[in-house]
Amino acid sequence: MEKPLYGRILLKLSGEALMGKDLYGIDPGVLAEIAQEVADVHRLGVEIAMVIGGGNIFRGVLGASQGMDRSTADYMGMLATVMNALALQQALEKHGIPTRVQAAIDMKEVAEPYIRRRAIRHLEKGRVVIFAAGTGLPFFTTDTTAALRAVEIGAGVLLKATKVDGIYASDPEKDPAARKFDRISYLEVLQKDLKVMDATAISLAKDQDMRVIVFNLRKQGNIRKAVLGQPIGTVVEGLGDVE
């Protein structure tokens, strides 16, 4: 059996990843495909934690831009992430993968409260843990949640799944000649204001030396490749490690 490079990972998915070609909501086919890929990685013996956004249902920043109070909008976005987490939990359990949802907002009827030591124990027992409701506080994105939880649980890497195959100097959908970075430092991401993750998330990853790999979720098998250490996407790490 192939040997994973990382024993414990934090996989960050956007809510939009669940939409497929739809404009809203959850595409059951896409959900099943993601669950299958996560299950394949789980069978390698990797401990998997996940954070998923809620933009396919409600995006707090968008609500605030339309005149809604930002705190209220962000709390609504947190609730959207819980809906996605529950859908993903069910999809994973159809593959026989025991899964727990831990929410940063108390909602004991549908999810466990987020308790770091309990989350680590679940991982050690082979359960996938999905962290929902962000940090439980407004003004923090799910990217920041992912960086925070990755550090808290001692993950070996933060895998940021996107719709493009890495970090580019400019938008590759608008500029076909855009340069792709194979490796880049945290500081360069911040200085160039590259929008792959928000500045708070990147700064936290930098402070704690948490490696981030940005890759294309749409290409089948990419989560497995990232976990096995195969060259894929863009690696974000300390300046001393970048050529």
Image: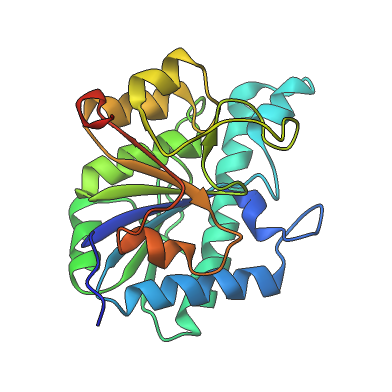
Looking at the image, which residue is at 56% across and 26% down?
169
The image's colour scheme reads rainbow
Q: Quadrant of residue 211?
A: top left
Q: Which residue is drawn at 47% across and 62% down?
A: 222
Residue visible at 51% across and 28% down in the picture: 138
Can see residue 110?
no
Vertical comparison of 178 with 116: above or below: above
Residue 14 lies, in percent from the top left, at 57, 48
Q: In this view, does 222 lie to the left or right of 229?
A: right
Relative image position of residue 139 (x, y in whole percent): 51, 24
Coordinates of residue 75 in the picture (x, y in percent): 57, 36
Residue 219 x %, y %: 58, 63
Q: Looking at the image, which is closer to me, 142 or 4? A: 4
- The residue sitting at 23% across, 43% down in the picture is 152
Position of 52 compared to 150: left or right? right
Image quarter where the C terminus lies is: top left
- Quarter holding the N terminus is bottom left
Look at the image and tell me whether residue 24 can be seen.
Answer: yes
